[in-house]
Amino acid sequence: MISVEDALTTIVSQIRILGTERVSLNDALGRVLAEDVYAPYNIPPLDNSAMDGYAVKYADIAGATPDAPASLEVTGDLPAGYTADHPVFPGKALRIMTGAPVPEGADTVIRQEDTRVEGSTVHILVEVPQGTNIRKAGEDVRQGSLLFETGTRLRPAHMGILASIQRAVLSVYQRPRVAILSTGDELVDIDQELSPGKIVNSNTYSLAALVRDSGGTPITLGVARDTKEALKERLLEGLHTDIILSSGGVSVGDYDFVKDVLQDLGLEMKFWKVSMRPGQPLAFGIIGGKPTFGLPGNPVSVMVSFEQFVRPAMRKMAGHRDLYRATITAQAEDAVNGGIGKKYFIRCKVTNRGGSYFVTTTGAQGSGILMSMAEANGLMIIPDDQEAVQSGDMVQVQMLDPEFGFTDKASY
Ligand code: AMP
Ligand code: MG
């Protein structure tokens, strides 16, 4: 049996980054950049006003107070979108709107609230430091600078910057296409009638959601009966994708044919069985260059295995640099049993109280109890060499909550 760490290293080393494609800016949200993006020009392009007010020379307003204002003649009006047709002369001012380029001769903008107007004269009521209320050319984006590196996942703010440098089309990595096959004579689908002995195929739905959540495109192959012929037929349909996932039939039962069938299809098996719980029965190998995962059948095991192994593989394929869920340190509020020689992943709920993390389990940890996964925001890790966690112990928790993000190193 292989350790979680070795299994992960083996998988990640087998994954190649997918090709690139060009998408329009509107379709780029959530995609991963496959190019370094440089700034073709300064943003803002010119020094401009941060306020509605008056463009002046600092020397003309130095010492101004409400009782002794600096009184300047207003020689023109400068809305946003236009440049001045004359400079600010000594003793004069130009009316200026937010975003309008600062005219030659001016070095300071006085906001309207600090002035009083009388005919064509503006009385400046305060002194402000030289340069106040001027946004400098290039203060947001400097011409020629590297803005976003290959591997950046595009978020809404990136969209704004890319628009402002007129990048209508971008090169991004392709999304992994992931085949999903469920196996088992006991399974009926969500629109089929249940009869005694049957259960609903839920794994296809949780896996398809995990694939989407990881930035991929699920290609569902339905349910294969527990015969070699049925499995082979369905798996063949998945071979044109980037990753193949099956669930169930990979353990040591009499009808667990997935491994055999994958090998018949040419699987180069890298390992079978990982020393972890849940999720021990897991086969990984390569068929015709395609990473192939025989995931366990239990509804919790399949999700935990996906999180440990499939998500990092998909992230690598899709060009991400940070492949692994982040972990935090939290104080356990329950005693939890693990076991020597296996890594335990305990469904748990982390709360932040007064700046510290506390963690409780979300209930019974049987690998068929999916409700405790639905209520969890993390997986508490009990290391291979630790028997149990006592209430009050500090533990590592792998956070499933997206706001905790990803890192470049798996830590357990
Ligand atoms: P197996 O490894 O095929 O023996 O499956 C282990 C357990 O997971 C059994 O109780 C199966 O009924 C259950 N199981 C397998 N596949 C699915 C599925 N697609 N949806 C829900 N439960 C499943
Ligand atoms: Mg089965």
Image (cartoon, rainbow, N blue to C red):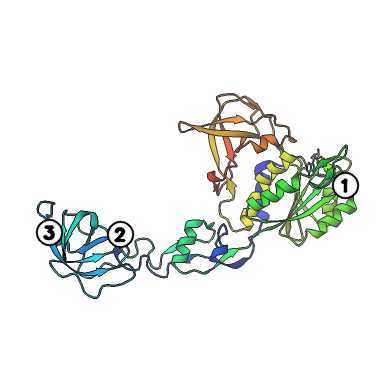
Residue 406 location in percent, x, y?
Answer: 55, 47
Which label sits in the foreground, 1 or 3? 3
At horizontal 13% and vertical 52% (from top left) the residue drawn is 65
Distance from the alpha carbon under mark 1 to that under mark 2: 69 Å
Q: Secondary structure at mark 1?
A: loop
Can residue 10 be seen?
Answer: no
State the separation of the CA atoms marked 2 and 3: 21 Å
**Tag on residue 218?**
none
Mark 3: which amino acid? Ala
Quick check: is the Cβ at mark 1 less than 8 Å away from ligand 2?
Answer: yes
Q: Which residue is mark 2?
A: 50
Q: Earlier in the sequence, mark 1 or mark 2?
A: 2
347 with respect to 39 (left or right)? right
Of marks 1 and 2, the one in the foreground: 2
Q: For the N terminus, which image quadrant?
A: top right
Question: Residue 253, position in %: x, y?
Answer: 86, 39
Q: Amino acid at mark 2?
A: Ala
Q: Based on the displayed image, in which of its 4 quarters is residue 184 positioned?
A: top right
Vertical position of residue 296 compared to residue 135: above or below: above
Q: Could you give the CA–CA distance between mark 1 and mark 3, rounded to whole angstroms?
A: 90 Å
Task: Report the residue that reaches farthest toward the left.
Answer: 68
Q: Which residue matches tag 1?
A: 226
Q: Residues within 10 Å of mark 1 (few under 14, many from 20)?
A: some
Q: Are marks 1 and 2 in contact (CB under 8 Å)?
A: no
**Tag 1: residue type?**
Asp
Under circle 2, the secondary element is loop
Q: Is mark 2 within 8 Å of ligand 1?
A: no
Seen as rendered, the residue at the extreme front is 119
Identify the disc placed on residue 70: 3
Q: Residue 240 occupies which quadrant of the picture?
A: bottom right
Q: Earlier in the sequence, mark 1 or mark 3?
A: 3
